[in-house]
Image (cartoon, helix red, strand yellow):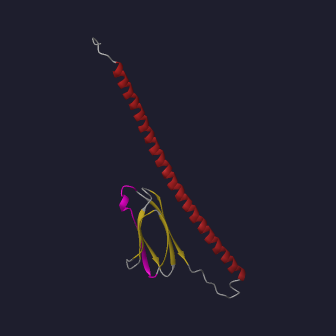
Amino acid sequence: MRMLVSLFGTINQERRLVQQGGSFDVDFDVLAPNRKSILSGTGERQGDYVFTANQYGEYSFCFSNEMSTFAEKLVDFEILVEHELRPQFKKDEKEQPKTLTEMEESIFRLSTSLTNIARTQRYFRTRENRNSVTVFSTGDRLFWFFILSSLAIISMAALQIFIIKSFFNTKKGGV
């Protein structure tokens, strides 16, 4: 999968979580507009990465599932642009009262807090998804283990009955 994003002169934070599929690992590569690799990793489950977009253009975020082609994967991917420019107002008192700027600062702080809460919820949702997959796979393994154990016990009982029966089975006409 490949995603193109236009960035320049900002500090960007990329967050990636593999939510389901296989061993929850994926290969990734972040390419600059000149096709040079900025970030790369193999077999990673999650990560938070920060980089600065030094060139203007489209940055490529590439994910690969080549090591596990039989299992589909669900990747939760988020790009946060930090140091965004806030709207600039004129310092004229007639157009912008001081309380308006304080209110705007409060709104920006609330927005940041809500973004952090949303990220935390997404993280916990991903962990819950991973843990539920682990519980289901463990349940399946236990089911098959008990089936095989039961078959082994039944076959051992049948074998013991056959052996004991052969000890007490005597031929007719013999001693």
Residue furthest out toward the bottom: 92
Residue displayed at 68% across by 88% down:
92
Magenta range is 54-71
Toward the viewer: 94 or 129?
129
Toward the viewer: 131 or 83?
131
Toward the viewer: 44 or 18?
44
Residue 86 location (% of width, % of height): 59, 80
Q: Quadrant of the N terminus?
A: bottom left
Residue displayed at 60% across by 65% down:
117
Q: Is residue 61 magenta?
A: yes
Residue 150 location (% of width, % of height): 43, 35
Residue furthest out toward the top: 173
Residue displayed at 49% across by 51% down:
134
Q: Quadrant of the C terminus?
A: top left
Q: Is residue 16 magenta?
A: no
Toward the viewer: 30 or 42?
42
Residue 58 location (% of width, % of height): 42, 77
129 is higher (above) or lower (below) than 105: above
132 lies left or right of 105 = left
Q: Tag count in the figure?
A: 0
96 is higher (above) or lower (below) than 59: below
129 lies left or right of 162 = right
